[in-house]
Amino acid sequence: MHRYAQKLHHLLRSLLLLSLITATSAQAAEKIDLIIDTDPGADDVVALLFALASPEELNIRALTTVAGNVRLDKTSRNARLAREWAGREEVPVYAGAPKPLMRTPIYAENIHGKEGLSGVAVHEPKKGLASGNAVNYLIDTLKTAKPHSITIAMLGPQTNLALALIQEPEIVQGIKEVVIMGGGALQWRQHHSGGGVQPVR
């Protein structure tokens, strides 16, 4: 049952960004102004490749990385690899929070492998990280954005956005919507390990 749940989780995570692409195409609307916050993970890399291959539908402003499936240095490298494989090296990658706000890190190397890509051979990407960090990038971008204009797709822990909102709560005005995979919500409820998303009614 656990293995089936993990496979379903991976599929849903990859389909998250695909649903954004499909919705935009169906509406024949303007591009989605998008920031992707991610902790790749093999499943996130698939989602990133979907998104990066859709420049007509998605205006990807940046990829922001966070510790989650594996350590921050590896999620940041894997995001840059996805960017390189997609031929989209103009999209900046910002490294973000190296650990959760309220608990010690719990990695998923048993699922994603030591490097986060389930055994795929990895190398150091040609292009490095953008200068600065993900939290400051979110603050600066949302603070100067048109009201309710930017969609944030969150494929992993929401630590970067949480830190940005704690520091500068007024940046919420720049957010159109936040699309959350939320795959760890059940795990948090099972282990009561601190953090997590609270239900809103």
Image (cartoon, helix red, strand yellow):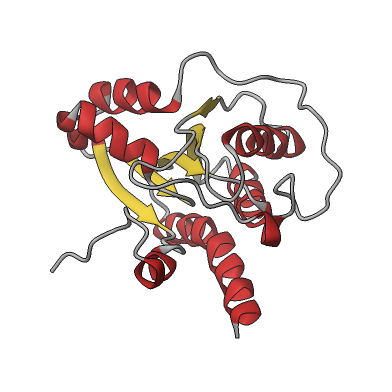
- Above or below: residue 35 compared with residue 26: above
At a point 52% along the width and 28% down the height, the residue shown is 95
User: In the rendered view of the protein, which quadrant contains the N terminus?
Assistant: bottom right
At a point 58% along the width and 27% down the height, the residue shown is 91
Residue 94 in picture, x, y percent from top left: 51, 26
User: In the rendered view of the protein, which quadrant contains the C terminus?
Assistant: bottom left
Q: In this rendered view, identify the residue nearer to me: 201 or 17.
A: 201
- Above or below: residue 135 compared with residue 4: above
Q: Quadrant of residue 189?
A: bottom left
Residue 139 in picture, x, y percent from top left: 30, 25
At a point 44% along the width and 27% down the height, the residue shown is 134
Residue 75 in picture, x, y percent from top left: 61, 39
Q: How many marks?
A: 0
Q: Quadrant of residue 3?
A: bottom right
Q: Is residue 6 left or right of residue 59?
A: right
At a point 48% along the width and 41% down the height, the residue shown is 36
Q: Is residue 45 left or right of residue 168?
A: right
Q: In this rendered view, identify the residue nearer to me: 121 or 174.
A: 121
Q: Quadrant of residue 2?
A: bottom right
- Above or below: residue 46 compared with residue 190: above
